[in-house]
Image (cartoon, helix red, strand yellow):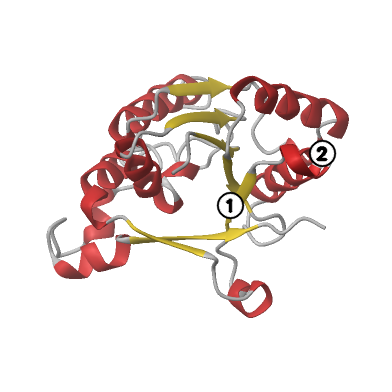
Amino acid sequence: MENHILMVFPHPDDESFGASGTLAKRIHEGAKVTYACLTLGEMARNMGKPLMANRITLPELRRRELAESARSIGIQDVRLMGLHDKTIEFEDQNMLDDMLRDLIDEVKPSLIITFYPGYSVHPDHDATGAAVIRTVSAMPKEQRPVVNCVAFSKGCEKILGKPDVLVDVRDFLPNKYGSIRAHSSQFRWKDMLGSYSENDEQIKSRFSTERFWTYHFE
């Protein structure tokens, strides 16, 4: 069992679909979770339907949504890292890597969850994953935590192979649903459900498995 999990994602809501059920399950089993969210997603195009915010008020709204999502999952430690949305790929790599190494040294995770660089669609996703991989690869081999990556680009399984880790989160779907609903400026949960309810088997089946690729360092 993991004793401390560090999740590193760039945006509020990145946790919801790919990792929230897994985290809720691991927390239930006794793990502590630190979530390092690099930005507040302040450049997001979505601002709610109907409109909930504007470009000025969106960052604070997304901060509150992240806090609500974390409560639903059970995350005990949320770190807002203060970087700017849509700029992670342009940040000074040494600064970014030092920031992550300091965090790793502090919380001493046995597992890190992040995006798989190159297979996660958004430039911020890929740059975040790349920074985690660089940072961990620079550590002595005996000190490296396991790194599990989320990937969802089209055809990623053809290149990466099947995921190394499949997590059944069916018993933690209420936590996952709550995490998704929390980010109401970004997602319309009712639209995702369509004519179904949260308890319909089609919805449970859709959300009940989370998959990760373990990054294999040289």
Which of pointers 2 and 1 indicates the residue nearer the eye?
2
Q: Quadrant of the C terminus?
A: bottom right
Query: What secondary structure is marked by label 2?
Result: loop
Which quadrant holds residue 49?
top left
Residue 26 at x, y percent in the picture: 37, 42
Residue 140: which disc?
A: 2
* Residue where numbered disc 1 is placed: 148
Instruction: Name the amino acid, label 2.
Output: Pro
Which quadrant holds residue 83?
top right
State whether residue 86 is above or below residue 161: above
Residue 179 at x, y percent in the picture: 33, 40
Q: Residue furthest front?
A: 142
Residue 56: which disc?
A: none
Residue 100 at x, y percent in the picture: 71, 29
What residue lies at 35% left-to-right and 36% top-to-bottom?
A: 27
Query: What secondary structure is marked by label 1?
Result: strand
Mark 2 crowd level (few <14, some 14–19, many ≥20, 10 Å Cα): few
